[in-house]
Image (cartoon, coloured by chain):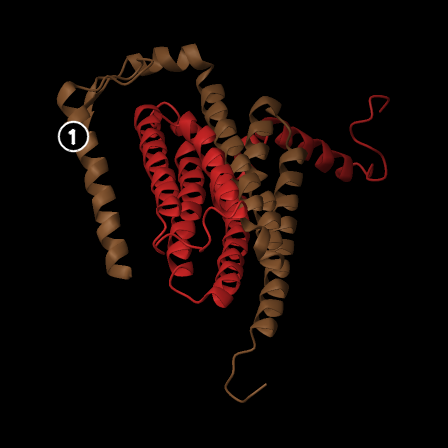
Amino acid sequence: MIYQYVLTRPLFALLTCIVYYSGVQQKHGIFNGDYIGLTLTVGVLLCLMIAMWGLMQVYRIFSLILKPNNIGSKFLAIKCYIFIHAVQGFVFAALESRVDEDKTLMVVRVEYTLVCLEMFLGALLNKYVFFHYNEYIDHENEDLMEKIRLESRTYGNTSNDPLDPEQ
Amino acid sequence: METGEVNFERIAQGLVVLSSLLVLGSLITTGVHVHQYLQNWTQPKIQILVIRVLALIPIWALLALLNVGLPQLRYFVGIFLDLYEGFAILSFMQLIYTYLGGKDQARWKASGKHPYRCFGCCCLLIPGEKMMKVSFYSKFFLIYLFIYLFMNLISFRSFML
């Protein structure tokens, strides 16, 4: 259910690329009278819905087992990125068909500037919330290292490396 | 240029500058984040998968910047965006299986759960099974849902036009 999206999403992107650049679909957007763009978008959204549902079920089954690994926030992150990307693409594709041809490129620019903004916010959220490195810190050895450092300072050995085996 | 006329070229330049700054910010933030991971490289098997998922941010940001600069290429660039999205999902699923101790372990752990119904009691989901078992009536329900959504989209389209 989830893996189908890995294959279908690039496949639909490739089809869209072929359809637009080969000139089969002249107009941009999805609500412009051509059914090809609309059909491709509906296909992507259906695959997305199935994949999101699959991810939700995986979380539902394993949420208790994976609780110590802080997996909830990671699921939320990956779902947010995929979902926002797809929904934003749909909304702006609808908007593209509403504006004049000369303003289409401006709509695309605004869309991807928003993506850049989301990526910046995503990077900050990843760093502090979703994928915090705290769970990978070796706390036991960190305490030991700190102890050695403190001891070496107390005995005036600050210039030497406390982990040097010769000392 | 007449007074009151919108200068799209200047707006486009502004958007390129703004997105460049945002991309730079996301690159720096992700770089620092990855550096923190490398400083605490205690579980390489898991952390490499996390870094693959984290790499989604700079790659998407750079491709989005390319789209802001060259919007004519958006369908072509979109393929790479979606390819990395797929790779990130694969890495994420691999991460979950690594946490659970492998695919067989995951299936074994899931088989301990009770089967439950979803989609308005139409689908019976049996955890641990390779494929979800879907009852006969629910297939009709899914086909109906697909047709209903498609018809709704068509009517929405005619409303927009």
Q: Position of residue B38 (x, y in %)?
A: 67, 34
In this picture, is A81 found above or below A75? below
Q: Position of residue B51 (x, y in %)?
A: 59, 34
Q: Which image quadrant is residue B23 in?
A: bottom right
Of B124 and B28, which appears nearest the observer? Answer: B124
State the residue position of label 1: B141
Chain A shade: red
Of A6 and A23, which appears nearest the observer? Answer: A23
> What's the residue at 34%, 28% (across, down)?
A63
Q: Count how many numbered circles sit on residues in the image.
A: 1
Quadrant in which the C terminus of chain B is drawn: bottom left
- Chain letter of disc 1 in the image: B
Chain B shade: brown
From the viewer's perspective, is A89 left or right of B157?
Answer: right
From the viewer's perspective, is A20 left or right of B149?
Answer: right
Q: Position of residue A50 (x, y in %)?
A: 32, 32
> What's the residue at 49%, 35% (across, down)?
A10
Element on which disc 1 rests: helix
In this picture, is B76 found above or below A112? above
> What's the residue at 57%, 44% (across, down)?
B76
Of A30 and B55, which appears nearest the observer? Answer: A30
In this picture, is B98 found above or below A119? above
Q: Amino acid at mark 1?
A: Phe
> What's the residue at 47%, 14% (across, down)?
B102
